[in-house]
Image: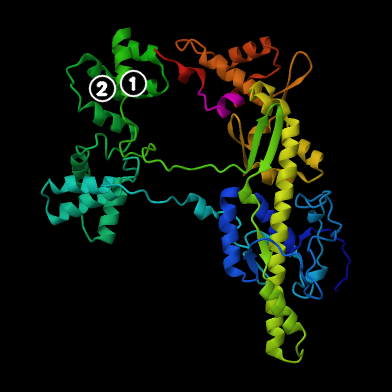
Amino acid sequence: MQKLGLNQIMTQKLSPQQIQFIKLLQIPTAELDTRIEEELEVNPALEEGREEDDEVNLDGSIDDPFSNEEKEDSGDNEDQDFDGDDSAQENSEDSFEDNFSQEVNVEEYVGEDEISGYKMQGDGPSQDEEERESPLSNDVTLHELLLAQLGFLKLDDRLTAIGTQLIGSIDEDGYIRRDLDLIVNDLAFSQNVETTIEEVEELLYKIQDFDPAGIGARTLQECLTLQIERKNIEDGEVEAARKIIAECFEEFTKKHYDKIQKKLDIDDETLKEAVHLITRLNPKPGGGDGSSVRTQYVIPDFLLFNNNGKLELTLNSKNAPELRVSRSYKEMFDTYSKSSKTDKKLKEAVMFVKQKLDSAQWFIDAIKQRQNTLLMTMEAIVKYQYDFFLEGDESKLRPMILKDIAQEINMDISTVSRVANSKSVQTDFGIYPLKYFFSEGIATDSGEDVSSREVKHILKEIIEAEDKKKPLSDEKLEELLNKRGYNIARRTVAKYREQLNIPVARLRKEL
């Protein structure tokens, strides 16, 4: 028998204006220009220039979509960031209920490009755009260089096809990481060339003689061996280096130098010279070590300067574009709205114009709201870290978490997070990402809390000053920090060391 039941649930939904603000808030200044250009292209009702004073309304006048507070019983959702004092953070759906009959659910809005005809893509780079790199011009690529050398071997068409396949399997680091049996299958299926693993390997050895040295290796050990074999083997350190790579490679990677000395029966000086020779070899002969690096310019979102002991904060002018609603479109709407309401095509035209006017006003309001939120957040950060911004001394950084700033500006933590994760500030001491100023607190013997960044700074100084022949273990580092008054556990020392990209003591050992 079918039963009827009544369940009460509570969900959080976002209006289109809120979605617009969220997306605009998280993009950095460098991408804001592109986002505005996209909006200008798709919305003819939006123009560049200062707003005019005599703004008229769609049903009398265009109301600010953020003018009335939208209150929904939404609990403590992370996207409810619009309860601040600024009136630009309050919003209403009354002015667009005719066009938007449905609200947008939090789970549904992510990834959506359009909501009821309103274009919202371009508010930040997609995953593909972030991973895509601009091509860099090179006179000759690695594969072109290798194919040219392959031509000097004067192979027949069949072996040339195998050699071309092998060269095509070399990655940007210069290695062949694909199994030879799979390459044999590729040749059979894609090029109808029958071969064997032995034949492919024989040709691979010839390719490994090409320049640059070490190219076509299948492992790091093989790569270093190919390079060391091109040196004068009669030199004592070269022979010792060859033996270390061939017979003691695992001990070498773990820096167990005493075991290497005992196994190869070599003196300290020979071992030191051999290790120095190996460390000068190229582990990435293909050039994938960043020899061709893209230059990335950082455009600060905020400018902060010390003017005779007084800190002056300004927002980058790129964050405050001059935008306005098109006067011609407003006049067009007035004309259409006063015309006959029975004409179907005319009604469609009125709806189209109204939608574009709404979208333009929404975008302008969201840009203004973005400016207000950025300034409020940064002002709170400057107030909290005032001593640091005066002198630039890292030890003056106070422990600060997102919740501290969120409480200061009376906004949700998620809003502060969106600002901190993608924005930067230019100071007299350099450009800093905002997330640099957020850190945990560590208790001291005096009972005060200091920033974890200060502890990392001290930890780095201790490691830099250590005896490289006898590097300090994490336990010893813990003792030294405790002596300086920082109450810190060994596992925390290990965590901070890893965050500083400093290896364990064994791997920091030098001869």
178 up-or-down from 465: above or below? below
Residue 379: image tag: none
Q: Position of residue 88 (x, y in %)?
A: 79, 55
Give, as a single range, the part of the protein colored magenta: 496-503
Badge nearest the viewer, 1 or 2: 2
Residue shown at the point (41%, 16%) measured from the top left: 256
As drawn, the label of residue 242 is 2
Tell me the quadrant of the picture where the N terminus can be found.
Answer: bottom right
Q: Residue at x 29, y 55 (%)?
A: 186
Residue 206 visible at all: yes
Q: Earlier in the sequence, mark 1 or mark 2?
A: 2
Q: CA distance from mark 1 to mark 2?
A: 10 Å
In the displayed structure image, the side of residue 310 where residue 507 appears, left or right = left
The C terminus - image quarter:
top left
For this view, does 42 lie left or right of residue 137? right
Q: Position of residue 172 (x, y in %)?
A: 35, 43
Above or below, 463 against 322 in this view is: above
- Could you say which is closer to the camera, residue 462 or residue 70? 70
Residue located 10% across and 49% down the image: 154
Of residues 313 and 222, which is closer to you in this image? Answer: 313
Picture quadrant of residue 480: top right
Residue 104 x %, y %: 74, 64
Q: Residues within 10 Å of mark 1 (few under 14, many from 20)?
A: some
> Is residue 257 magenta-colored?
no
Residue 497 in the magenta stretch? The answer is yes
Mark 2 residue crowding within 10 angstroms, few (<14) / some (14–19) / many (20+): many
| Residue bearing the label numbered 1 | 248
Q: Amino acid at mark 1?
A: Cys
